[in-house]
Image (cartoon, rainbow, N blue to C red):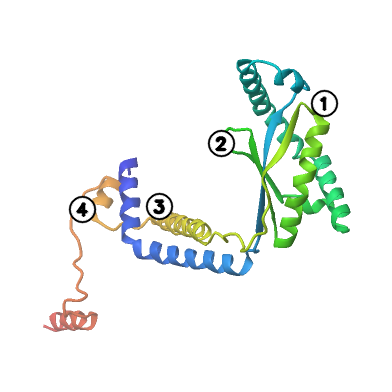
Amino acid sequence: MNIDANVQKILFALLRKWKLIVIFAVIGALVGYFYTDNYTTLTYTSNVKFLAYATDGNDDVEQNASIDYQRSSNTSKMNYARSMLPTYITIMQTNEFNQRVITDLNESYNANHPVSMLNGALDIQILNDTAIFQISVTTENPELSYEIAKQLETTVPKIMKEKNQGLVRASVEDRAMKATSAGSLGYAKKMLFSTLIAIAVSAAYVVLRTLLDVRIKSSDELTEKYNIPVLGSVPNFEGRGITATSVKGVEGYVKKE
């Protein structure tokens, strides 16, 4: 059997078993919903936004300079801050940064949080290719997420001032707010994912069963597979009102005659 015939055979089998695939898809969606509803943890996120800006210590000179010079200088500083921002973001993704944040947090709130608490809790992104970056804090406790975000408002500018001789610094542009509700559990996304898996499994089952089925279902398949002519076929009497018993009775009558 050539490749095209195999493909046609598989497609026909999938179409013939569409009800099975639909049933699997529905089961997959239900499994995804049940898993999301019972095994997904609620999380709460607080965001804080910063503006990165460059400074060179010549502010007094710039105040007495021409407007054109000040504009050129400000543009150069902004471009420098934007170009250096990915470096500072990388610094904020280090264990040293996490340790500094936790130390300041414990001092501010008289707590004893472990540094491991920040693992996976911080998400830092540069917004729309600008000098503004956002740090999102996500934990299972809305109060804790808010406290960490508030601490970042103080700790991040300090760390940026200490690095690279303070050439790039940060100011708070949008302060943190306490989350009033949990983040989305992602029902649609997880249900879609489980549905696609179920469809793939059911389709694979149908395909494998089709390919492993070696039974001959037509005279055309017999001729194609063995290259021998078909001399005749036995008719199917089932469903035509003639049972096996009646056929035997006819045979006995013929022999008796």
Q: Amino acid at mark 3?
A: Leu
- Residue 48 rendering spot, x and y as whole percentages: 67, 47
The crowding category of the residue bearing disc 4, from other C-alpha atoms within 10 Å (few below 14, some 14 to 19, many at least 20), is few
Q: Which residue is mark 4?
A: 230
Q: CA distance from mark 3 to mark 2?
A: 51 Å
Q: Measuring 31% from the left and 42% from the top, which residue is drawn there? A: 4
Q: Which residue is mark 1?
A: 165
Q: CA distance from mark 1 to mark 3?
A: 69 Å
Q: Are marks 1 and 2 in contact (CB under 8 Å)?
A: no
- Residue 39 rendering spot, x and y as whole percentages: 63, 66
Q: Measuring 70% from the left and 61% from the top, which residue is drawn there? A: 142
Q: Measuring 80% from the left and 28% from the top, which residue is drawn there? A: 166
Circle 1 — which element? helix
Q: Amino acid at mark 1?
A: Gln
1 or 4: tag closer to the N-terminus: 1
Foreground label between 1 and 4 = 1
Foreground label between 3 and 2 = 2
Q: Nearer the viewer, residue 167 or 43?
A: 167
Q: CA distance from mark 1 to mark 2?
A: 27 Å
Q: Nearer the viewer, residue 168 or 64?
A: 64
User: Relative to 47, is 232 above or below?
Assistant: below
Foreground label between 1 and 3 = 1
- In the displayed orientation, state which residue is furthest to the left: 257
Horizontally, residue 252 falls left or right of residue 63, namely left
User: Relative to 141, is 85 above or below?
Assistant: above
Q: CA distance from mark 4 to mark 3?
A: 24 Å
Q: Which residue is mark 3?
A: 211
Horizontally, residue 73 falls left or right of residue 163, namely left
Q: CA distance from mark 1 to mark 4?
A: 92 Å
- Residue 6 rendering spot, x and y as whole percentages: 34, 46
Q: Which residue is mark 2?
A: 128
The crowding category of the residue bearing disc 3, from other C-alpha atoms within 10 Å (few below 14, some 14 to 19, many at least 20), is few
